[in-house]
Image (cartoon, rainbow, N blue to C red):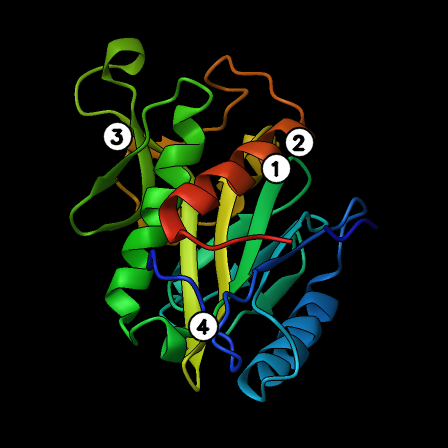
Amino acid sequence: MAQAELGIATISDKGGIAPVEWRIDDAPVPYPAALAAMDERVAAIRAGRAPELVWLLEHPPLYTAGTSARPGDLVAADRFPVYQAGRGGQFTYHGPGQRVAYVMLDLARRGGDVRRFVCDLENWMIAALARFGVKGERRAGRVGIWVDRAREKGPGREDKIAAIGVRVRHWVTLHGVSLNVDPDLGHFAGIVPCGIADPRLGVTSLADLGVYAQMAEVDDALRHAFAETFGARQR
């Protein structure tokens, strides 16, 4: 294990800029362990005992249910473990080949604007994808980042490449984003991803788009794009 939406850097109690800490886990992290670690870190950030954190990791294959998840959208309940996430949104899949980024930022020191935070998460994903020549886009009424596939798959076809689901506790953020690098896209068939059943809307990945990037390259793109979007120093 290696440690390594707002555009306003966090101000420390001494008047300086407190860098955002980055942590990267090479081995898959069990979902309950990730939830417990986030809870502990968020409490420490709120108490001023730890800096903000971006945590990059992968999970074993599993489904998570957000606070708006509908039971009927879990198509194959016995396929993988299912966890209540506590984040916003509906069902999603996590597994190998997908880079999950848990973002723990102190919004009280960043203007207290949750909508702006979510918008900056979207901008972050769009900027990171652009580094691989992929045009990610937001869509009104649909959370996440989408890729227009009309040229390859027909009129109106769009696929989601990055999902977003967040929670804010005492103005500190939890959860974050998941970017499909090269997961088994067939595993999404066990759910109605994010509650969207329109047959013209699917899921994709960098590999599915013909971009074969190593996870370390994706992590590098995420770190650079984060600095561009959030404007914070890193450590």
Is 73 on the left-hand or right-hand side of 28?
left
Report x, y in % for residue 84.
55, 72
Mark positioned earlier in the residue sequence (1 or 4): 4
Please give the residue where the numbered disc 2 appears in the rendered image: 215
Q: Is residue 35 visible?
A: yes
The residue carrying mark 3 is 200
State the image coordinates of residue 99 (x, y, percent, origin top left). Answer: 60, 42
Please say if the residues under marks 3 and 1 sit with CB atoms less than 8 Å apart.
no
Q: Quadrant of the C terminus?
A: bottom right
Mark 2 or 3, nearer chain start: 3
Q: Earlier in the sequence, mark 3 or mark 4?
A: 4
Q: Secondary structure under badge 4?
A: loop
Q: Secondary structure at mark 1?
A: helix
Which quarter of the figure has residue 213?
A: top right
Residue holding disc 4: 11
Return the residue nearer the eye: 41 or 141: 41
Element type at mark 3: loop
